[in-house]
Image (tube, rainbow, N blue to C red):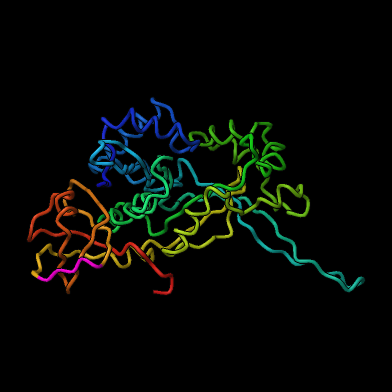
Amino acid sequence: MSFIIRPVQYDDLGQLVDLAKQFNLLNLPGDKKVIGEKIERSQESFAGKLPKNKAEYLFVVEDVEEKLVVGSSLVIAKHGSEEVPHSFFKILKRDHFSQDLGIGFIHQVLRFQLDFDGPTEIGGLLVDKTYRRRPEKLGKQISLSRFLYMGLHRDRFEDRVLCELTPPLTDEGRSEFWEALGRRFTGLPYQEADLLSQSHKEFIESLFPQDDIYLALLDAKARLVLGRVGEATKPAQHLLESIGFNYLDEVDPFDGGPHYGASTEEILPIKYGRRLKVTEFKDASYKEQNLVATTSDDFKACLASVDIRGDEIAIAPISRQLLGVDIGEEVYAAPFNYNRGK
């Protein structure tokens, strides 16, 4: 089978809605109107028509033979502005010591923060359930390909990249952390508050406590999930860690999910991404696997078997055909597999 990663098109609407309905992502809900608006915003973003704080780039992976959209990933160019700040809890430590008793405690506290000059955020990662665990590793392909686009268009993105990971939730989709904290200050159920926060942030700033919150005072169930990653999200966590992301000691104010981040230049597909000239070698071995992307306005990427020598790259014919690139043209390539210590 052949797979290509490309910007979403309006013709993808029906298939993308069906795909989103398999999951329950807040930044990519299975709602035709919402996804239609996201497709429109994405097309304007790729065309360079939106300012950074409005731009969202939605990528899809297509099964070319079946003409099926089987995965997606999203990049929000800037998450947090004067208009709509990015909110989170910073986890800090505070020491308390009693001279009389001769004992001390190190307490963890949550401090509510707002970022008015926020980072780029990644999210919206979906792979059709029938295409999971395939040898092509489609989740990894669609996740990493967006960094190739960012590497090609650095000016469109911030110098920091954030990913908010989903924590463990109850079987009913409830957040123990929200029940112990957020609900007490807003009176709203978790799903309603999280949905509202996608478009309205004022209530968070107005109703959340501004003083430090001692974790010792929270319910044990809430403390247990704070900063933890849900089972279904662990593969995404491990992938991010392998390419340079680290836990920021920050959590989502709604569900306590951990925030991971990295300096954009240090994300390995960007750090090791290179512009190379397409060529043919008579003795090409194609032993290496790279993600390869076009450098034209018509962005496409795929996982390809390649032979790289200096500034030249030979691409296996089937992949070169998928990308639609000719000998002598330029592509952008980055390794597919990483050891963190590389």
Q: Position of residue 52 (x, y in %)?
A: 34, 46
| Residue 7 location (% of width, % of height) | 27, 42
Relative depth, front residue between 168 and 41: 168
Extent of the magenta region: 283-287
**In-image side of 329 versus 34 (left or right):** left
**What residue is drawn where x is 74% and y is 62%?**
107
Q: Nearer the viewer, residue 113 or 239?
A: 239
* Residue at 60% across, 45% down: 253
Compared with 12, 325 (above or below) is below
Q: Picture quarter containing residue 267? A: bottom left
Residue 264 position, x and y percent, is: 38, 61
Q: Residue at x 33, y 67 (%)?
A: 271
309 versus 144 height, above or below: below
Position in image of residue 41 (x %, y %): 32, 36
274 above or below 227?
below
Total marks in image: 0
From the viewer's perspective, tell me whether residue 131 is left or right of residue 238.
Answer: left
Q: Residue at horizontal 9%, vertical 65%?
A: 280
Image side of residue 174 versus residue 327, left or right:
right
The quadrant holding residue 57 is top left
> Which sits in the foreground, 202 or 289?
289
Determine whether, in the image, residue 301 is placed left or right of residue 161: left
Q: Quadrant of the C terminus?
A: bottom left
Q: Residue furthest right?
A: 100
Q: Is residue 91 magenta?
A: no
263 or 165, nearer to the observer: 165
- Of helix, strand and loop, which mostly describes the magenta segment? loop
